[in-house]
Amino acid sequence: MYYDLKFMSVPLPEDIIKLKNYGDFKGAEKLIEYLLSKKIPEALRKRLEIEQDIIRIVGINEYPFDFIEANKMMKETFKDYEEQELTNLKDTGKVDWLYIDGTIHFQRRFLLNLIKTQADYEARLIVKEDNEVDRLRKQELTQNVQKMKEQGSRKVKIHLKTSIQVKKEYERPGETVRVYLPLPKDCKQVSDIQILKTSPEATFIAPEKEAQRTVYFETILKENQVFSVEYCYTNQVDYVTLDPEKVSEIQPQFELSEELPHIRFTPYLEQLLDEILSGETNPIKKARKIYDFITTQVNYSFMREYFTIENISEYAAVNLKGDCGVQAILFITLCRMANIPAKWQSGLYVSQYYTGCHDWAQFYVAPYGWVFADLSFGGGARRNGDLDRWNYYFGNLDIFRMPANSEIQREFNPPKHFLRADPIDNQRGEFEYENQGLPYAYLDVKQTLVSMEELV
């Protein structure tokens, strides 16, 4: 089932909110079923249908650890740990939690998030992580900035293999499955896309201009079957220095509208934007003020599934936290509100040291055209004291990317039959049986860089 997510902007009935806040998900489901059996406005009906799946995802998968389990995990992970610490972390918003049946439960990645975002806890690890890969990745990014400034551009040919497989305990051989994997799409920096190999043979390959491009498989599932695709493409990024004095008097009027529920011009965001801009009118300076606010005030944090958040941009601005995609959506929203065209781009970050999911943004200023902003990479560089790299990611991007998506919450080609594991974006792929779609907890996803060749 494809949901039109704009209906998430419809308010929930008060009694459902009360039940959700207490963590009585069974009670909330029961009330939703009762309301759906009545004659109610169609917009409210669609909102309640979406809420049924949100409750299912939050209640089962996202917050598995109660206080006792979480405390045990903390004690096994950090030196000199005292039980009161977890309460203090909860009370100061440094760990994500909610109530389930009136009892506090912590988000499934709360421990990893604590290690990534709180340096004092990373220093107290009982088993020290090997940070060599992270150090080399940051070094590679810093070197990219230097090369881009020296050369004016970089061009690489990237060869990738990605795969998806259902975990053994959820495998149902002999049943029909529909499987999707993301593909590089035609966009500003990508050209010469070649699909080298699929396993099994692809049923359909979406056009290169598709907003969320995929390769699609429909087949009878075999035991231990892996679905994979190999492809290569050319990625070229040109270095740009944005000069506010060279801004054109006439600016374009596209990519400026709301896209409910997440790109929404709320009263709070309007007040926040007025505070950020402080009367500034130059579009480059406005975009830079928005970039600076997000990269200095919105702390990086792992997120629960995006589908469970009612309004991502306002969530980031109110809670002052979010991962790469949350920060990118806030940037896009504030730029559009400031009359600066802005849009989405996402897919994979690809390098010899790490390959994984990543999101970033684009914004448009004449006469420069579309340029990039990577909020999480920029914010990370600033936190590490690399101000040159922080400034670079306002206007520029590195070469280590595979863009698969140019818009959020778009339907696949061909469409899925059931709710997607991620209905906002597509970086890992999707998998469904004849009677249900599968969440990522049921799947194994791999992304492997085969080669990266720098071109002259």
Image: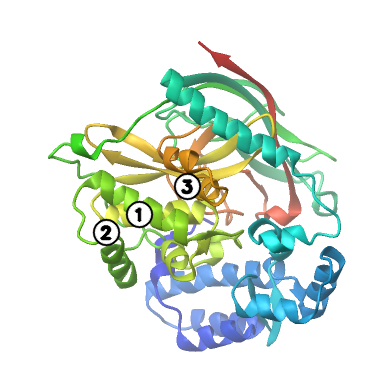
Specify the quadrant that holds the N terminus: bottom right
Question: With respect to residue 122, does 94 lie above or below?
Answer: below
Camera-side residue: 448 or 353?
Answer: 353
Q: What element carries label 1?
A: helix
Q: Which is closer to the viewer, label 2 or label 3?
A: 2
**Mark 2 to mark 3 CA distance (whole Å):** 35 Å
Q: What residue type is labelled 1?
A: Ile
The quarter of the displayed image where residue 334 is located: bottom left
Q: For residue 277, which numbered disc appears in the image?
A: 2
The reply, left or right, for residue 123 in relation to residue 32 is right
The reply, left or right, for residue 122 in relation to residue 387 is right
Camera-side residue: 13 or 237?
Answer: 237
Within 10 Å of disc 2 (Cα), the crowding (few <14, some 14-19, many 20+) is some
Question: With respect to residue 227, does 149 lie above or below?
Answer: above
The quarter of the displayed image where residue 82 is located: bottom right
Camera-side residue: 438 or 396?
Answer: 396
Pointer 3: what residue?
411
Within 10 Å of disc 3 (Cα), the crowding (few <14, some 14-19, many 20+) is some
Is residue 212 visible from the viewing direction of this image? no
Q: Are marks 1 and 2 in contact (CB under 8 Å)?
A: yes
x then y, percent, for residue 378: 49, 46
Question: With respect to residue 242, does 152 lie above or below?
Answer: above
Q: Is mark 2 on a helix, strand or loop?
A: helix
The disc, 1 or 2, on the residue closer to the chain's N-terminal end is 2
Q: Is mark 3 on a helix, strand or loop?
A: loop
Q: Which amino acid does label 3 sit on?
A: Glu
Residue at left 82%, top 52%?
128
**Mark 1 to mark 3 CA distance (whole Å):** 30 Å
Is residue 137 visible from the viewing direction of this image? yes
Q: For residue 290, which numbered disc appears in the image?
A: 1
x then y, percent, for residue 94: 62, 70
